Image (tube, rainbow, N blue to C red):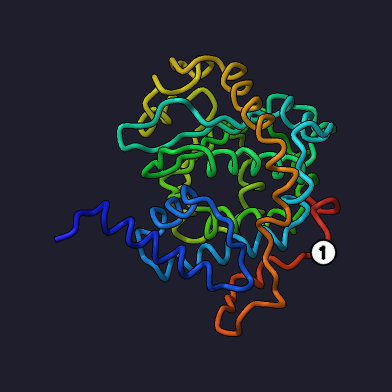
Amino acid sequence: MPDQETENNRDLVSIKDWLSKQPHLPHEVDELLLRRFLSSCGYSLESTKRTIDLFFTIRSNAPEIFFNRDPWAPEIRRVFEITDFIPLPKKTSENYKVFIFKLNNPDMDLFNFVDAVKTFFMLADTRLTEEDDIPAGEIPIFDSSNVSLKFIPKINLSVLRKYMLYTQEAIPIRLKQVHVINAPAYISKIHAICKPFLKTEVAKLIKFHEPNSETLYKDIPQEILPDEYGGKAGNLEQIKRYWIKRIEAKRDWFLSNDKRWAVDETLRPNNCRDDRADKVRDLPGSFRTLALD
């Protein structure tokens, strides 16, 4: 009987062959990325095909977050400075990759939601195309210590919807847990905005942790966290600077990738329609006029 690696390689050949026959999809896709799709889809070929199609379809229909990405642009550099988007160096014993997401500056006048999402996906793309290791799962930790109610009017509803669909159904990862730490009392108002876009199975993964609590350590080993969280992974700034340099080193790729990963809808076969793709259409407005109770 063929071993698992042989079967996986056979699946990879099958996906490459399928992709080459899709006139609407990009054909120059890194083998590493295709392996990530297969892994995240449990090596189901049909699920992998649907996910790859949705991945590129959403990206093509969200130019505000996937096009014109220059790590040296002033708006991107501002995001680097006021936020911490940090993949931690060590994984859990289950081989899960852990992230810290934090606003390090409470001044909401400096924060731009669309720019922040764009920058976050630049980091994600750097990992997807360069990290050889494929973890068994991903665990984001959102530190909401500097998030105030002024964050709500900053949310762009259209971009939020695309972000939620892409991260839950298109990006080749397996989400295992979601933690919101230092959660203020009003975090429920922000959660309520995201809730309509949350899949039921993802909503069940979310855990909220009050300020100054140690409940996070029940799920995440404290030693793999940054120094600021009582861990031994180094300080946030050091880890962040490492990732900023990696993103900047990929500048030429970002500047040339808009068209390379685009979908040509005029060439899409009729049997390749996906109702989920309709969800990426723009929605009008934002929460700028939202009345809070």
Q: Which residue is mark 1?
A: 284
Q: Is residue 286 left or right of residue 231?
A: right
Q: Is residue 113 shown to the viewer in this render?
A: no
Residues 259 and 240: in front is 259
Residue at the extreme bottom? 270
**Left or right of residue 138: residue 161:** right
For mark 1, does the 10 Å Cα neighbourhood hold few (<14), some (14 to 19), or many (20 or more) residues? few
Say which quadrant the N terminus sits in.
Answer: bottom left
Q: Residue at x 59, y 22 (%)?
A: 242
Number of numbered tags placed on the structure image: 1
- Specify the quadrant of the image occupied by residue 267: bottom right
Label 1's element? loop
Q: What percent of the width, then of the height, locates residue 261?
A: 65, 57
Residue 49 visible in the displayed image: yes
Q: Percent x, y for residue 288?
A: 84, 50
Residue 145 sits above or below residue 270 on the image: above
Most foreground residue, 115 or 142: 115
Q: Position of residue 274 (x, y in %)?
A: 57, 75
Residue 118 falls in image quadrant: top right
